[in-house]
Amino acid sequence: MAIERTFSIIKPDAVAKNAIGGVTAKLEAAGLRILASKMVRLSEAQAKAFYVVHKERPFYAGLVKFMTEGPVVVQVLEGENAIAKNREVMGATNPEKAAAGTIRKDFASDIERNAVHGSDAPETAKEEIAFFFSTAELAALAR
């Protein structure tokens, strides 16, 4: 199996609940290694740019408002099949439908305040990592 990198955000709701450690523990317990992590506060322009793929959807404005209401923790994760593993550990987007023990089941409030974001494909992961982490920051991670 291939070692890959993926991108993760611990969203403002989970940060406000002081759940950073709990989310991180679940990621690490699943075999994901945190290569880079930093807390940032997104500007409206950054949130709009990051979620531009959803621009035409009815929830876009609310998503931008939510993602700018407090700090987030952005992370680069690495491991075997990291993208799929991260998405499995996150659980279903709607925490009511998420499996027991997943991040969203344990820490999310509802489908809109769902605690975490994770890349859905290798191309997306590469773009999302580059959005938040510079080449210089990532160069320090090389093995």
Image (cartoon, grey):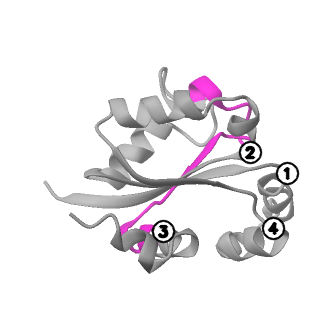
Residue 123 vs residue 67, the one in the foreground:
67
| Res. 108 visible in picture | yes
Q: CA–CA distance between discs 1 and 4?
A: 9 Å
Span highlighted in magenta in the image: 105-126
User: Which class describes the residues within 10 Å of circle 4: few (<14), some (14-19), or many (20+)?
Assistant: some
Q: Secondary structure at mark 2?
A: helix
Q: CA–CA distance between discs 2 and 3?
A: 18 Å
Residue that badge 4 annotates: 43
Q: Is residue 121 magenta?
A: yes
Where in the figure is residue 115, as x and y percent of width and height?
65, 40
Residue 138 vs residue 112, the one in the foreground:
138
Q: Secondary structure at mark 4?
A: loop
Circle number at residue 129? 3
Circle number at residue 69? 1
**Is the residue 105 above or below the residue 76 in the image?**
above
Residue 54 is left or right of residue 27, and the answer is right
What residue is at 59 percent from the left and 35 percent from the top?
A: 20
Q: CA–CA distance between discs 3 and 4?
A: 17 Å
Mark 1 or mark 4: which comes first in sequence?
4
Residue 36 is left or right of residue 43, and the answer is left
